[in-house]
């Protein structure tokens, strides 16, 4: 009993330190299921996939063999079909980040500066609903809006504003709109915390010294929110470049980005090794963004766990 | 109930219940007009597709026109009476419940360990549990699929195999919300119970658990809704004859606009709205800022 009481005395502030603590109490048993689960179903599969990428491509075979080669990567970077898709993915993701920022900043500012807790919660719920709602459902709505016979084109034609439908979908434009839809809530949530964290007296001081609202914003508020701008943009980039379903639906297979090549190699051709190589490239590009995002938020927003 | 109220206070939640008095919006006029207009445009981009799905699901005609021809429950009835999307919806619900239970138990246990024991590798362990969210979902799904096939453990294209993938991407949310609830919990309360003779499990169950319950509930709701709307992980892992709702909708959307799919969407939207309303009561919504990548 007495031993138990001393064990319970580990508070978050006065937690024990040193490796000895890891097994000094039986608490480590609590983390064991999660740790083992992640090891078996996350670490091993990912290592295996990345290892398969270095095997020569054989259709229909999914087994790691000791014969290593860079054949898949040579094929990827040797053919404009594939490295072109990688470049297209990167450019699209950059464009998406830019427009997401352009749309997201005013909304984040608006919500952050809304003082009424009731309305603030209401806006947050709207943003979270749009974030958590299945992306395929949102794409359904977007496709009904943007299709050749969709709401926008049909309405414009009916009121004789245009003669032929505008090409709003099954092209890069449609994919960009879809990806902006996908990443916008993440951008907004990245920015709200930063904007709310600004000491209001800084803005008040600038205003009382005669600065206009605009110049206060550009000289005081905006520079202080740059970490959030960067974090949100990196997050949007990583989300946009990883998406399969948005380019597949909004691009109608005509805008071929990396996740689409990845899916085709596996599901249609059965080239697991080459598909794995595309997965490695996709992971590396998105990881650079995610890693940078992580470094920025660690210092500014604070870790969650 | 008192514990819940206290918890809400600790989280400084902007919950309507705790702030019945509406403050005058004097400061709101400080928001420049450009930002107000921009905010309206952004809200339209965010929500218009959702509104369109609701209208398409409740539309009287075969195709959605502007202005709508009229409302009817025709497609909702069709959704409820034909197996196509109804079964996909029910399957998604079942998967989400199983994922929620597994992730909540496993994640809560891990969170207790991580807030109570300090050791040099703690930040590495934290990154370890967040790492499934850092991988593109399609890549993670593919890795699991390749692992199932090559190891021949009988999980390829099965429901348990898909549930494993969903658990990987929902546990981080539970660990996040439960950890922050545990940080806000005063451990001396549990110690007091222990010194009064309660056993370790009894003290935890009767004192700590009620105090962190809102964090656990928020985490499990998030796990539920992330699993329910999961597409990327399911793409490679779903079974050919049993498809969850996002996959079923994706397959049908490649060919035509099925109004029944929109009716299914209306039910999915309702579920997400209810979940987020519950979450807003339980925890500070701002905690979820940028949670996707930790």
Image (spheres, coloured by chain):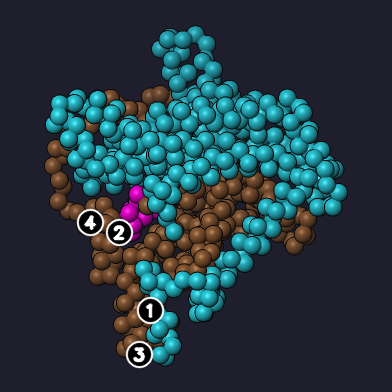
Chain colours: A cyan, B brown
Q: To which chain does the residue with label 4 belong?
A: B
Residue A39, position as x, y percentages in the image: 64, 62
> In the image, which disc is placed on residue B197?
3
Q: Which residue is mark 1?
A: A9
Q: Name above or below for residue B5 compared with residue B57.
A: below
Residue B65, position as x, y percentages in the image: 44, 25
Q: To which chain does the residue with label 1 belong?
A: A
Magenta segment boundaries in residue numbering: B272-286
Label 2 sits on a secondary structure element that is helix
Q: Quadrant of the N terminus of chain B?
A: bottom left
Task: Measure the C-alpha gap from mark 1 to mark 2.
Answer: 23 Å
- Residue at 75 percent across and 62 percent down: it is B153
Q: How crowded is the residue under tag 2: few (<14 C-alpha within 10 Å), some, or many (20+)? A: some
> In the image, which disc is placed on residue B11?
2
Q: Are marks 3 and 2 in contact (CB under 8 Å)?
A: no
Label 4 sits on a secondary structure element that is helix
> In the image, which disc is placed on residue B17?
4
């Amino acid at each position: 009993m007495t031993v138990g009481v001393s064990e319970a005395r580990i508070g978050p502030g006065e937690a024990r330190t040193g490796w000895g603590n890891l097994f000094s109490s039986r608490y480590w048993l609590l983390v064991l299921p999660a740790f083992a689960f992640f090891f078996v179903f996350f670490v091993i599969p990912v290592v295996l996939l990345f290892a398969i990428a270095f095997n020569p491509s054989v259709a229909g075979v999914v087994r790691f063999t000791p014969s290593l080669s860079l054949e898949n990567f040579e094929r990827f970077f040797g053919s404009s079909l594939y490295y072109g898709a990688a470049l297209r993915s990167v450019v699209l993701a950059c464009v998406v980040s830019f427009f997401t920022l352009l749309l997201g900043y005013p909304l984040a500012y608006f919500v952050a500066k809304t003082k009424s807790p009731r309305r603030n919660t209401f806006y947050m719920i709207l943003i979270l609903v749009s974030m958590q709602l299945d992306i395929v459902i949102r794409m359904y709505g977007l496709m009904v809006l943007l299709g050749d016979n969709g709401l926008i084109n049909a309405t414009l034609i009916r009121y004789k504003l245009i003669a032929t439908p505008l090409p709003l979908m099954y092209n890069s434009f449609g994919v960009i709109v879809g990806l902006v839809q996908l990443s916008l809530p993440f951008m907004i949530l990245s920015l709200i915390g930063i904007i709310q964290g600004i000491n209001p007296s800084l803005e008040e001081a600038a205003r009382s010294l005669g600065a206009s609202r605009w110049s206060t914003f550009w000289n005081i508020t905006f520079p202080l929110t740059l970490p959030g701008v960067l974090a949100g943009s990196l997050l949007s980039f990583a989300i946009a470049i990883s998406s399969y379903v948005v380019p597949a639906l909004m691009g109608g297979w005509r805008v071929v980005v990396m996740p689409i090549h990845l899916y085709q190699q596996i599901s249609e051709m059965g080239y697991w090794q080459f598909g794995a190589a595309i997965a490695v490239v996709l992971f590396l590009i998105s990881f650079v963004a995610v890693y940078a995002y992580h470094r920025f938020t660690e210092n500014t927003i604070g870790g969650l766990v | 109930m008192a514990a819940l109220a206290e918890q809400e206070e600790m989280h400084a939640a902007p919950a309507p219940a705790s702030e019945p008095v509406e403050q005058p919006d004097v400061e709101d006029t400080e928001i420049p007009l450009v930002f107000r207009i921009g905010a309206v445009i952004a809200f339209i981009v965010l929500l218009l597709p959702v509104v369109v799905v609701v209208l398409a699901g409740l539309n009287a005609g075969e195709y959605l026109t502007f202005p709508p021809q009229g409302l009817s429950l025709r497609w909702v009835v069709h959704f409820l009476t034909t197996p196509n999307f109804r079964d996909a919806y029910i399957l998604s619900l079942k998967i989400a419940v199983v994922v929620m239970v597994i992730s909540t138990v496993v994640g809560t246990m891990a969170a207790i360990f991580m807030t109570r024991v300090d050791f040099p590798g703690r930040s590495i362990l934290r990154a370890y549990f967040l790492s499934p969210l850092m991988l593109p979902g399609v890549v993670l799904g593919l890795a699991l699929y390749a692992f199932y096939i090559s190891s021949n453990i009988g999980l390829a294209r099965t429901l348990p195999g898909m549930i494993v993938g969903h658990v990987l991407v929902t546990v981080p949310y539970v660990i996040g919300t439960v950890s922050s609830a545990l940080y806000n919990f005063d451990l001396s309360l549990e110690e007091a119970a222990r010194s009064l003779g309660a056993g370790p499990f009894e003290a935890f169950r009767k004192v700590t658990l009620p105090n962190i319950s809102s964090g656990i509930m928020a985490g499990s709701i998030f796990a539920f809704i992330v699993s329910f709307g999961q597409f990327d992980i399911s793409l490679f892992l779903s079974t050919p004859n049993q498809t969850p709702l996002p996959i079923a909708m994706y397959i049908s959307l490649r060919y035509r606009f099925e109004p029944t799919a929109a009716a299914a969407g209306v039910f999915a939207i309702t579920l997400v709205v209810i979940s987020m309303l519950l979450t807003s009561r339980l925890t500070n919504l701002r905690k979820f800022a940028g949670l996707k990548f930790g």
